Image (cartoon, helix red, strand yellow):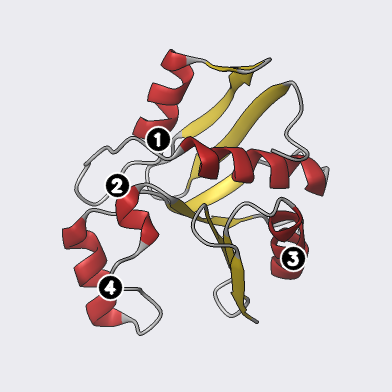
Amino acid sequence: MRGAGDIRRLRMYSGRTGERIDMIYWIEGDYIKDAVKEVNHFMRDWRTDDVKSMDLRNVDIMAAAHNLLEVDEPYMLLSGYRSPKTNAMLRSRSRGVAKNSLHMKGQAADLRLSTRSVSQMARAAQACRGGGVGKYSGSNFVHMDCGVVRSWGG
C-alpha cells in the first residue's frame, strides 16, 4: 500500500461511544492479531454492537491517507461496520445510503478531521489508489472503501 510504510498505525475516536484507538496494527509485513481484533471491535456497528472483521485493505487505505495528510489529529469515525438492520434504517432516512453498502461487508468507513478539509482528505485517499472515495462536504466527512477505484461527491 503506497504511503503506508513499514509500520502501520491507526488513530481514531468515536463521537458516538467516546472510545479512542491509537495502535500499530502492522509491522514489517505482518498484521498484529490482537491489534486487528481491537480495530474490528472499535469499528463495530455502535447501534447494534455487532462486530465484523474489517477488510484490512480498507484499514490500510485509512492509515496511508492519514500519513499523507501529515496530521496529529486522530480520525473521527462516523461509520465503520453497519449491520443490515442499521443500513436499512439509514437508507429509509437518506438517499445517499447504498442498498448493498460496503459498510455491511466491513469494507468502508466514513471519517472526519477537523484540521483538514473534505477535499484534502479525499485527495489523500485517492492518492492511495485502493478503492472508492466519496466526498460529503455538506456533512463534512469522507467515505473510504476498498471496493472498485472510483470517486464521487462534492
Left or right, 107 with respect to 21, comes to left
Q: Distance between the residues labelled 2 and 4?
A: 19 Å
Left or right, 89 with respect to 4, comes to left
In terms of image quadrants, where is residue 123?
A: bottom right
In terms of image quadrants, where is residue 36?
A: top left
In the picture, the disc for residue 144 is none
Q: Earlier in the sequence, mark 3 or mark 1?
A: 1
Q: Is mark 1 on a helix, strand or loop?
A: helix
Q: Whole-percent x and y of residue 41?
A: 35, 32
Instruction: Provide the residue designation for mark 3.
Output: 117
Instruction: Provide the residue designation for mark 4.
Output: 99
Q: Which of marks 2 and 4 is in front?
A: 4
Cβ atoms under marks 1 and 2 closer than 8 Å: no
Q: Nearer the viewer, mark 1 or mark 4?
A: 4
Q: How far apart are marks 4 and 3 (CA)?
A: 28 Å
Q: Whole-percent x and y of residue 59?
A: 54, 39
Q: Which of marks 4 and 3 is in front?
A: 4
Instruction: Provide the residue designation for mark 1.
Output: 42
Instruction: Provide the residue designation for mark 2.
Output: 46
Residue in front for this viewpoint, 111 or 59: 59
| Residue 71 seen from this side | no
Q: Earlier in the sequence, mark 2 or mark 4?
A: 2
Q: How crowded is mark 1: few (under 14 residues within 10 Å), some or many (20 or more)?
A: many
Q: Distance between the residues labelled 1 and 4?
A: 24 Å
Q: Whole-percent x and y of residue 26?
A: 60, 20
* Three-letter amino acid code of the residue under disc 3: Ser
Cβ atoms under marks 3 and 2 closer than 8 Å: no
Q: Which of marks 3 and 2 is nearer the N terminus?
A: 2
* Residue sticking out furthest to the bottom: 95
Q: Residues within 10 Å of mark 4 (few under 14, many from 20)?
A: few
| Residue 64 seen from this side | yes
